[in-house]
Image (cartoon, helix red, strand yellow):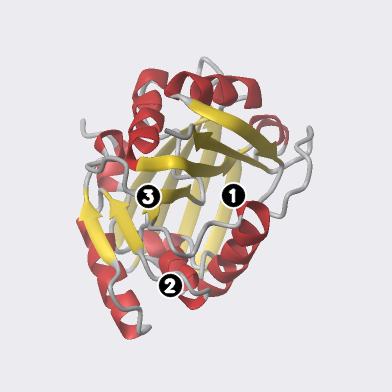
C-alpha cells in the first residue's frame, strides 16, 4: 500500500479544507513576521507548499525570493497557476520529497506551515527532514515548524464528525494509533459520483522530543510557542510552533 501522503494531496484535498484560505494564510504570515522577522533580502523556502497560499501571502508582504517545495504534482500545478494569477513574479517550485531537500546553504528561512511535519512512518524519517532543512539553510538561517500540539490534540479529539457541503456528505473518524503516538484520520465522502476515502496520519511530538530532534539536526537558539501569535506553550495550546537557527559559519 502506498503511503497516505502520496495519495491524499490531490486537487480535491483543497475541497476538504475550504477554511484554509488566502485570508488565513495572510494572517499566518503576518504572525510569522512578528515572531521571527524573516529577512526580506534572503530566500525563503515554503516546505510542503501545497497550493501556494503562504507563498502568495509572503509575496504580498514584500518577499521576492520565494521557493515552494511539495511532493504533490497536482497541488504544485495549482500553486504555479495561483501565484501567476496573483501577480507573484519569480516564484520557483520544486517537486521533491521533503526528506531529500535538493538544496545546500541556499535559504535564509524555511517555513513548514499547517502541520506539514510528522507525516512519515518513523521518527528517523522525520529527522531526515530536519537534517535536510538544516543543510538547506544559510549560516544563521532559521527553520520554523507549525504543527499540532500533542496534549491539546489528545484532550480535544473528536472521534466522529459528519459534515454536509456542496451536495456531499463527509463522515470523519479520528483516533489515536495503538502506540498513542499518532492521530489517525479517515474521511469518507459520499456524493452523486460515489464514495471516496482519504486517510491522514500525523505524528504527535511532545515539545521535548521535537526540541531534541532539532538539536540532533544541528539547530541552536531553539524557541517554542503555543501558536504563531507567539503565545506561550501550555497544556491547552492547539499548536506547537518551534524555530531553530543554523549556527554561523
Is 192 on the left-hand or right-hand side of 231? Answer: left
Q: Which residue is mark 3?
A: 107
Give the class, few, some or many, for how many residues have Cα within 10 Å of label 1's Cα (few <14, many ≥20). few
Q: Quadrant of the N terminus?
A: top left
Tell me residue 241's x, y (percent). 62, 42
Q: Which residue is mark 2?
A: 56
Tell me residue 214's x, y (percent). 51, 26
Decide: is 69 above or below 76: above
Cβ atoms at labels 2 and 3 below 8 Å apart: no
Q: Which residue is mark 1?
A: 161
Query: Real-space Cα distance between discs 1 and 3?
Result: 41 Å
Is disc 3 placed on a helix, strand or loop?
A: strand
Mark 1 vs 3, N-terminal side:
3
Question: In the current view of this chain or complex, which residue is farthest to the front?
Answer: 249
Please identify, in this view, whether the residue under mark 2 or under mark 3 is nearer the observer: 3
Nearest to the observer: residue 172 or residue 211: 211
Query: Real-space Cα distance between discs 1 and 2?
Result: 32 Å
Cβ atoms at labels 1 and 2 below 8 Å apart: no
Query: Real-space Cα distance between discs 2 and 3?
Result: 18 Å
Q: Residue at x 27, y 76 (%)?
A: 81
Q: Quadrant of residue 38?
A: bottom right
Amino acid at each position: 500500500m502506498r503511503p497516505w501522503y502520496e495519495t491524499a494531496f490531490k486537487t480535491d484535498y483543497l475541497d476538504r479544507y475550504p477554511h484554509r484560505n488566502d485570508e488565513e494564510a495572510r494572517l499566518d504570515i503576518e504572525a510569522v513576521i512578528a515572531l521571527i522577522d524573516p529577512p526580506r533580502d534572503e530566500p525563503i523556502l515554503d516546505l510542503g507548499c501545497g497550493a501556494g497560499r503562504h507563498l502568495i501571502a509572503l509575496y504580498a508582504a514584500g518577499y521576492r525570493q520565494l521557493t515552494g517545495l511539495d511532493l504533490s504534482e497536482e497541488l504544485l500545478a495549482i500553486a504555479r497557476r495561483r501565484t501567476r494569477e496573483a501577480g507573484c513574479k519569480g516564484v520557483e517550485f520544486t517537486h521533491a520529497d521533503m526528506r531529500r531537500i535538493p538544496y545546500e546553504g541556499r535559504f535564509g528561512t524555511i517555513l513548514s506551515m499547517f502541520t506539514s511535519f510528522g507525516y512519515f512512518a518513523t521518527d528517523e524519517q522525520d529527522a531526515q527532514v530536519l537534517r535536510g532543512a538544516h543543510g538547506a539553510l544559510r549560516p544563521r538561517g532559521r527553520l520554523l515548524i507549525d504543527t499540532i500540539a500533542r496534549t491539546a490534540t489528545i484532550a480535544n479529539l473528536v472521534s466522529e464528525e459528519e459534515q454536509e457541503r456542496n451536495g456531499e456528505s463527509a463522515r470523519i473518524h479520528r483516533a489515536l494509533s495503538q502506540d498513542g503516538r499518532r492521530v489517525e484520520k479517515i474521511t469518507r465522502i459520499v456524493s452523486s459520483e460515489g464514495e471516496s476515502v482519504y486517510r491522514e496520519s500525523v505524528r504527535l511530538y511532545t515539545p521535548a522530543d521535537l526540541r531534541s530532534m532539532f538539536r540532533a539536526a544541528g539547530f541552536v537558539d531553539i524557541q517554542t510557542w503555543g501558536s504563531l501569535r507567539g503565545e506561550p506553550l501550555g497544556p491547552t495550546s492547539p499548536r506547537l510552533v518551534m524555530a531553530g537557527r543554523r549556527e554561523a559559519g
